[in-house]
Image (cartoon, rainbow, N blue to C red):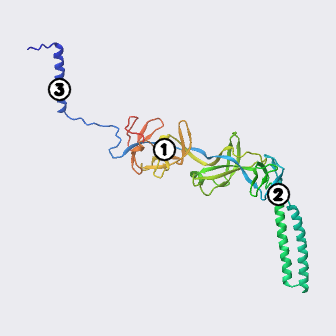
């Protein structure tokens, strides 16, 4: 059987034979070495990382705490006797002065007992004086004198008890303030210990909040501070209290800002933001991607020291914007690793490639150049 080959078949066979010859000849040819002009690991064994020399921007820092307004004093007045409410002299929300009568309870027969106790005391005083004079003349013995003195002491105790009961029937303001809540009306029968009325003192008033434990050492009693209230108004004051012990659940410290308020008019529970100015510091604007946590959970950045060793630079957050975050705690100047920090460990010596303001980069020591194609990966 004869196979007829046309020109197309002949061309395909020739092309196949040429490819086979090319592959065979390449396997016996000299091997070319691959060379990376920009290696991640230098000839001296040091890893190359990109480093930026950063200058801190002098910034006035503030400790900010979310809080709310509160009275400087509050008291919940309770009944000390079982009695009926006879009269209410102050309405809710009304201002009161110290000693003002707010609620009057039925004293029942205690006013009469008070008069009786006063008369009894007067009689016992006369008897005690007479016994003392007779004893001085030798006409009364020590036992008779002791009996009259005991009767006098009992009369004094009865008078005090009656006076307490009468006073307990009149509920008075313990200080200047505002009647905030009242739990009874005229005709109600109250028991001893029952809550009657709450009085608040807003002169001055407080803005209270919880201070993070990281800032506890930076805030002290007497520090000047201010607060921004919910309506946007700013009020000045000073720190009057910082808790010495943290809350067991939140690990925060209670803090109180005292605001002068001669008018005494304010509302408790209004949302406010406490601002406590701190000494000037140097702030740095960085990408959030550079933030790391060390083994102790401390927030920071990876940098290098003068010997080009990788070190941990602890920082604190200041504020954030659309382009990154502001941090502080690095001093006036810092060398921060911006590319490659995920491939190096603390204490390891590296080959830094410094970023220039123009976007060019230079390595030290030497004059090696790198660009965006350098085999560095952000950690």
Which image quadrant is residue 228 in? top right
Q: Does residue 251 appear to the left or right of 355 in the view shown?
A: right
Which residue occupies the foreground of this view, 19 or 115? 115
Q: How far apart in space, not on screen, are marks 3 and 1 (Cα)?
A: 56 Å
Relative to 71, say whether 129 is above or below: below
Q: Position of residue 154 (x, y in %)?
A: 83, 72
Name the residue carrying label 2. Answer: 169
Residue lying at the far left in this picture: please name it.
Answer: 1
Relative to 305, say whether 233 is above or below: above
Residue 20 visible within the image: yes
Q: Nearer the viewer, mark 2 or mark 3?
A: 2
N-terminal of the pair, mark 2 or mark 3, is 3
Which residue occupies the foreground of this view, 38 or 243? 243
Q: How far apart in space, not on screen, are marks 1 and 2 (Cα)?
A: 66 Å
- Helix, strand or loop at label 3? It is helix
Which residue occupies the foreground of this view, 65 or 183? 183
Which quadrant, please, contains the N terminus? top left
Q: Does residue 182 appear to the left or right of 364 in the view shown?
A: right
Which image quadrant is residue 171 in? bottom right
N-terminal of the pair, mark 1 or mark 2, is 2
- Helix, strand or loop at label 2? It is loop
Q: Does residue 26 appear to the left or right of 234 in the view shown?
A: left
Relative to 273, say whether 15 is above or below: above
- Helix, strand or loop at label 1? It is loop
Name the residue carrying label 3. Answer: 20
Name the residue carrying label 1. Answer: 291
Q: Position of residue 313 (x, y in %)?
A: 48, 49
């Amino acid at each position: 059987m004869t196979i007829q080959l046309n020109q197309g078949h002949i061309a395909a066979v020739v092309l196949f034979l040429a490819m086979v010859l090319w592959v065979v000849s390449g396997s016996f040819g000299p091997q070319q070495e691959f060379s990376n002009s920009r290696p991640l690991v230098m000839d001296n064994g040091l890893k190359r990382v990109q480093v930026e020399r950063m200058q801190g921007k002098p910034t006035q820092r503030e400790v900010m705490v979310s809080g709310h307004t509160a009275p400087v004093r509050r008291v919940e007045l309770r009944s000390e006797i079982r009695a009926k409410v006879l009269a209410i002299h102050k309405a809710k929300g009304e201002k009161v002065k110290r000693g003002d009568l707010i609620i009057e309870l039925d004293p029942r027969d205690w006013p009469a007992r008070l008069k009786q106790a006063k008369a009894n005391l007067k009689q016992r005083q006369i008897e005690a004086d007479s016994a003392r004079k007779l004893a001085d003349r030798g006409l009364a013995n020590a036992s008779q004198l002791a009996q009259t003195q005991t009767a006098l002491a009992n009369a004094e105790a009865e008078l005090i008890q009656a006076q307490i009961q009468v006073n307990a029937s009149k509920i008075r303001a313990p200080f200047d303030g505002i009647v905030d809540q009242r739990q009874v009306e005229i005709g109600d029968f109250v028991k001893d210990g029952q809550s009657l009325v709450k009085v608040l003192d807003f002169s001055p008033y407080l803005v209270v909040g919880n201070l993070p434990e990281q800032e506890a050492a930076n805030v002290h009693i007497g520090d000047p501070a201010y607060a921004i209230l919910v309506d946007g108004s700013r009020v000045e004051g000073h720190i009057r209290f910082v808790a010495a012990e943290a809350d067991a659940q939140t690990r925060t410290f209670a803090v109180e800002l005292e605001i002068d308020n001669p008018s005494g008019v304010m509302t408790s529970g209004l949302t406010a933001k406490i601002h406590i100015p701190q000494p000037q510091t140097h702030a740095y604007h960085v990408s959030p991607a550079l933030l790391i946590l060390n083994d102790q959970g401390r927030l920071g950045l990876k940098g290098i020291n003068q010997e080009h060793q990788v070190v941990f630079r602890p920082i604190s957050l200041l504020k954030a914007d659309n382009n990154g975050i502001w941090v502080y705690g690095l001093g006036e100047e810092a060398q921060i690793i911006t590319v490659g920090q995920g491939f190096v460990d603390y204490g390891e010596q590296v080959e830094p490639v410094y970023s220039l303001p123009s976007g060019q980069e230079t390595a030290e020591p030497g004059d090696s150049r790198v660009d965006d194609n350098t085999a560095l990966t952000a950690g």
